[in-house]
Image (tube, rainbow, N blue to C red):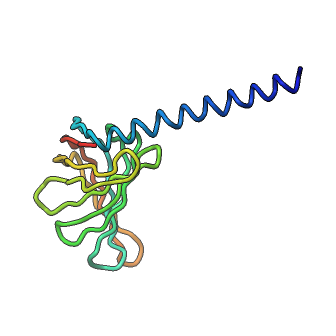
């Protein structure tokens, strides 16, 4: 009798896990089939690093983004144009580019952000120049942004 209860318990556990995986996959598939445009907001701090004395500049971004939670981004800039990846709290990624027009544009991603589009405009709240060792420089910007994201 005890062996039968253990086997039934394992079967039920596997069934529940299987149903949960199916539900998650279905929502990801539906999102990819029928993307929805949602408001997007970000509050963050960017650090631009000039470690080689010229372009490209390396960008590190940390903050809070709607639909991502705590987010961390990395990118490269040459002049006013750049590109990069922002990681959501769960590891999903959003790809972006900045063509210098004042709008950060979403160009796809991974997980629920696969095929993401939209973008946001930003306002710089503060900026600081921080000299580093032996010719390295960094600029730190705090900013907010608003726009839309479709995924």
Classify the position of the N terminus by image quarter. top right
In the image, taking residue 105 as reference, residue 28 lies left or right, namely: right
Q: Which residue is drawn at 21% across and 43% down?
A: 145
Compare residues 81 and 85 and report the one nearer the observer: 85
Q: In this view, does 56 lie above or below 122?
A: below
Residue 87: percent from left, percent from top: 40, 51
Q: In this view, does 23 lie above or below 72?
A: above
Classify the position of the C terminus by image quarter. top left
Compare residues 11 and 78 and report the one nearer the observer: 11
Q: Which residue lies furthest to the left in this view?
A: 101
Q: Is residue 83 above or below residue 108?
A: below
Residue 83: percent from left, percent from top: 27, 64
In the image, taking residue 98 as reference, residue 133 lies left or right, namely: right
Quadrant of residue 132 within the rendered picture: bottom left
Residue 25: percent from left, percent from top: 45, 40
Compare residues 96 and 31 and report the one nearer the observer: 31
Q: Which residue is drawn at 16% across and 47% down?
A: 121
Q: Which residue is drawn at 36% across and 60% down?
A: 74
Residue 55: percent from left, percent from top: 26, 76
Compare residues 54 and 128 and report the one nearer the observer: 54
Q: Residue at x 53, y 37 (%)?
A: 21
Q: Count the marks: how many?
A: 0
Quadrant of residue 89 within the rendered picture: top left
Quadrant of residue 32 within the rendered picture: top left
């Amino acid at each position: 009798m005890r062996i039968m209860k253990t086997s039934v318990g394992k079967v039920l556990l596997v069934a529940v896990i299987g149903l949960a995986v199916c539900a998650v996959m279905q929502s990801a598939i539906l999102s990819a089939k029928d993307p929805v445009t949602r408001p997007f907001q970000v509050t963050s701090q960017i650090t631009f690093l000039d470690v080689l004395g010229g372009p490209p500049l390396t960008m590190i971004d940390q903050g809070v983004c709607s639909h991502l939670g705590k987010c961390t981004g990395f990118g490269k800039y040459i002049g006013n144009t750049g590109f990069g990846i922002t990681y959501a709290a769960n590891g999903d990624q959003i790809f972006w580019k900045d063509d210098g027009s004042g709008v950060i544009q979403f160009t796809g991603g991974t997980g629920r952000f696969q095929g993401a589009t939209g973008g946001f405009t930003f306002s710089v709240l503060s900026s600081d120049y921080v000299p580093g060792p032996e010719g390295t420089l960094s600029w730190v910007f705090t900013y907010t942004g608003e726009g839309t994201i479709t995924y």
